[in-house]
Amino acid sequence: AVGSRYQDINGDPIAVHILATAGTQPFQTGFGGQRIPIGSNLGEVTVELTPAADRDVSADQFISEWRKEIGLIAGVVELSFRQETSAGGNAIDIEISGRDLKVLEAAATHMTDKLAGYTGVKDISTDNRRGKRELVYEQVTPTGKALGFDLQSIAMQIRQSFYGEEVQRIQRGRDELKVMVRYPVEERRSIENLEDVRLRSMNGAEVPLAEVAEARPARGPASIHRVDRKRSIKISADVDRARANANEVVDRLNTEVLNDLSTKFPGVSWDYLGEQKDQKDSISEMGYKFIFALLGIYVLMAIPLKSYVQPIIVMTVIPFGIVGAVGGHILMQMDLSIMSICGIIALAGVVVNDSLVLVEYVNRHRKEEGSLIEAVRNAGAARFRPILLTSLTTFAGLMPMLVETDMQARFLIPMAVSLGFGILFATSITLFLVPSVYMMMEDVKRLLGKVFKQS
């Protein structure tokens, strides 16, 4: 109903494909390598919309209307909506593990209660769902103890009665058939049948199950998950990006909950999954690569400049380029992402071009004129137009990407923002920073020369 209510620019419904799945939730984890929920009590509906450029309704607006249209469904324990099915999973995916299930469940409840109090956090859920109803036999009656029963022997005889006991195997050609002895089908269908099961005691006497063990009704877990032989529970939540920033929510959760989780709940450990884990791993890996990139830039400039100091002068503009990239994200109201960081790494190799032009000009004219002050003073005026035109043309080349609204281009827009705004800001700083740092380095060299000469 919601999909047909809105039309694209051609007048067709914006809902292109609808996929309903029962018994599993394949898109719940975004096919990101995490465990896919499976169970007869699970279901999922996936809707593919027309491209964003062909419709006036955003995916968030569509989900909001869809949520209102559905409302509360009788018998449904958990109902959540997600905008994307990317490989990263939910905005927040945390896995806690421990040996004591009660402590683990208390920790999970504590975390979900905290998340529910954060602005913009929605669709909070855990995979510790209750399954089908069951009877739990956890205590032997005095009569049962007198007859020599314990829980293990009771469980074994119940299993033999309902599942069966293998008594022999018969070979028929290439096939081997198991012969199982158990109660008839009509005597294995109800709780009354279970209570009437006859158990054999050590002295050979047969007694009803109800006389030797006490049962209580309960609901077992829909699924059991373990990590390193410990029970585990996954807590998931999504973040409304119009109201909150996922990274800020995670930082707050770290400070208020996760840092003290093991203290409040002994034996419980935690780790990030999904989007946060991927982001953490990627940032850590990119940090090392960024260092190697800076070393490569330094070496490539040190060779032609024949100096250990002047490459540092050229590279002083890189931090200001990063400031411009962050400022561009703030101006465009975008969150920093992995692609933003990729753009910042690429930016480091681009913004040094203007600095290199200035330093090379100063070196050449210093040899010709002999005056450092005149060479530095003339460098900014002489190279102002080439530097400005280079930066403006680079930014102009990125403009089509910055204003693109197509879904396929959204992936690259953060990189274009980092490059474009980083270059613009770094250019304005370069014309003032590089000449000043050049003069400062020369003053330091003269000062050190005097000190070593006196010593």
Image (cartoon, grey):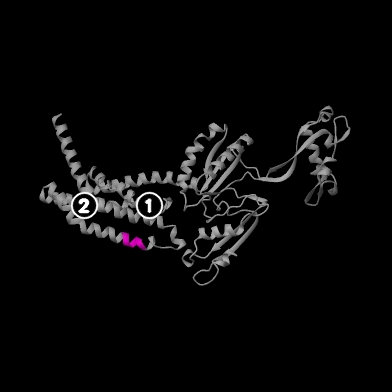
Residue 252: in sight, yes or no?
yes
The residue that mark 2 highlights is: 358
The residue that mark 1 highlights is: 330
**Residue at the spot 20% in from the left edge and 56% down from the top edge:** 383
Please report whichever mark, 1 or 2, sits nearer to the chain's N-terminal start.
1
Q: CA distance from mark 1 to mark 2?
A: 30 Å
Q: Quadrant of residue 4?
A: bottom right
Amino acid carrying label 2: it is Leu
Find the residue positioned furthest to the bottom: 10
What crowding class fits label 1: few (fewer than 14 Cα within 10 Å), some (14-19), or many (20 or more)?
few
**Residue at the spot 29% in from the left edge and 46% down from the top edge:** 299
Q: Please tell me whether residue 145 is drawn above or below residue 384 in the rendered image.
A: above
Residue 396 is a magenta residue: yes
Looking at the image, residue 222 sits to the left or right of residue 57; the answer is right
**Residue at the spot 24% in from the left edge and 58% down from the top edge:** 388
Which residue occupies the foreground of this view, 141 or 418? 141
Under circle 1, the secondary element is: helix
Which is the main secondary structure of the residues drawn in magenta? helix
Residue 49 coordinates in the image, percent (x, y): 53, 63
In the picture, which quadrant includes the N terminus? bottom right
Looking at the image, residue 439 sits to the left or right of residue 6; the answer is left
Residue 14 coordinates in the image, percent (x, y): 54, 66
Which residue occupies the foreground of this view, 192 or 339? 192
Residue range in magenta is 395-399
In the picture, which quadrant includes the C terminus? top left
Report the label total: 2
What crowding class fits label 2: few (fewer than 14 Cα within 10 Å), some (14-19), or many (20 or more)?
many
Amino acid carrying label 1: it is Ile
Under circle 2, the secondary element is: helix
